[in-house]
Image: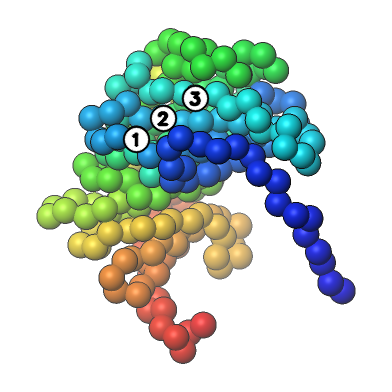
């Protein structure tokens, strides 16, 4: 059978470049909204996230009232290089995970509700509504979320740029309770140095054993790295897979 797609609908002209995009139901109305990580003036400029409400209409009136979230309270700076969304605290509203150019991974709690979500000052309105999960020492180029520790909560995997002595692959375990105030613990088996940037990372059950594993792109070597989840909160690094023309 064949499939067709409708003509694209222009959402909005923006004054700054969008570097990364995710979807999540930020206001709990059952429709996924758009979440954009923005390019800003430099590493000393407050990071910016723009959110667009899904009004469940396939027309130009959908997503046409953006809200700009300036990360000034948390003092997170620079471009947002990657972004993700899921319900971090289990309150029924999807929250935001963002990777900022100043080396920080930040989580933001959604205010929730059809009105409160779409007021910019409600984001970062109190220190209990955001937390810097980690400073990863270099630009965090990629993030993904998924259950790595065997709990019902999703954890965060991070790939970073490289510098001497740095670890370009990292992951952080969801604390289980009070995720916006409790510490996220680094998963030691997933802390790896590759000496080259890790530009993408993804979580999935690659060996069909019921436990999520991690794959990541090792730049400049044409390799994809794998870490197998052993199912007991430990991981085993597998041999990298070289991706050549013959492999595709």
Please give the name of the residue rendered at 51% of the width and 82% of the height, measured from the top-left corner: 248
Residue 107: quarter of image: top left
Q: Which residue is mark 3?
A: 68
Question: Is residue 193 shown to the viewer in this render?
Answer: yes
* Residue at x 24%, y 58% (from the top left corner): 193
Count of marks placed on residues: 3
Please tell me how crowded label 2 is: few (under 14), some (14-19), or many (20+) other residues with Cα within 10 Å.
many
With 95 as the anchor, is 80 left or right in this view?
left
Question: Taking 28 as reference, is 82 above or below it?
Answer: below
Residue 55 marker? none
Query: Nearest the camera: 144 or 26?
Result: 26
Disc 2 target residue: 48
Residue 87 x, y percent position in the rendering? 59, 31
Does the CB distance between marks 2 and 1 fall below 8 Å? yes
Q: Quadrant of residue 112?
A: top right
Tag 2, which secondary structure? strand
């Amino acid at each position: 059978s064949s499939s067709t797609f409708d003509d694209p609908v222009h959402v909005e002209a923006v004054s700054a470049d969008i570097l990364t995009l995710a979807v999540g139901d930020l206001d709990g109305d059952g429709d996924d909204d758009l979440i954009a990580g923005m390019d800003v003036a430099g590493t000393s400029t407050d990071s910016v996230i723009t959110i667009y409400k899904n009004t469940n209409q396939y027309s130009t009136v959908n997503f046409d009232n953006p809200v700009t979230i300036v990360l000034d309270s948390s003092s997170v700076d620079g471009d947002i290089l990657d972004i993700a969304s899921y319900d971090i605290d289990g309150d029924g509203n999807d929250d935001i995970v963002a990777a900022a150019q100043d080396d920080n991974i930040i989580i933001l709690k959604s205010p929730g509700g059809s009105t409160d979500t779409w007021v910019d000052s409600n984001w970062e309105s109190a220190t209990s509504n955001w937390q810097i999960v980690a400073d990863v020492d270099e630009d965090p180029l990629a993030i993904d979320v998924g259950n790595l520790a065997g709990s019902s909560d999703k954890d965060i995997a991070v790939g970073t740029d490289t510098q001497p002595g740095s670890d370009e692959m990292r992951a952080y375990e969801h604390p289980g309770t009070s995720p916006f105030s409790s510490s996220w613990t680094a998963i030691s088996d997933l802390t790896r140095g590759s000496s080259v940037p890790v530009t993408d990372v993804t979580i999935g059950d690659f060996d069909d054993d019921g436990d999520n594993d991690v794959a990541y792109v090792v730049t400049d070597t044409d390799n994809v790295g794998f870490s197998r989840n052993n199912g007991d909160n430990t991981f085993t690094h597998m041999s990298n897979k070289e991706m050549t023309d013959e492999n595709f």
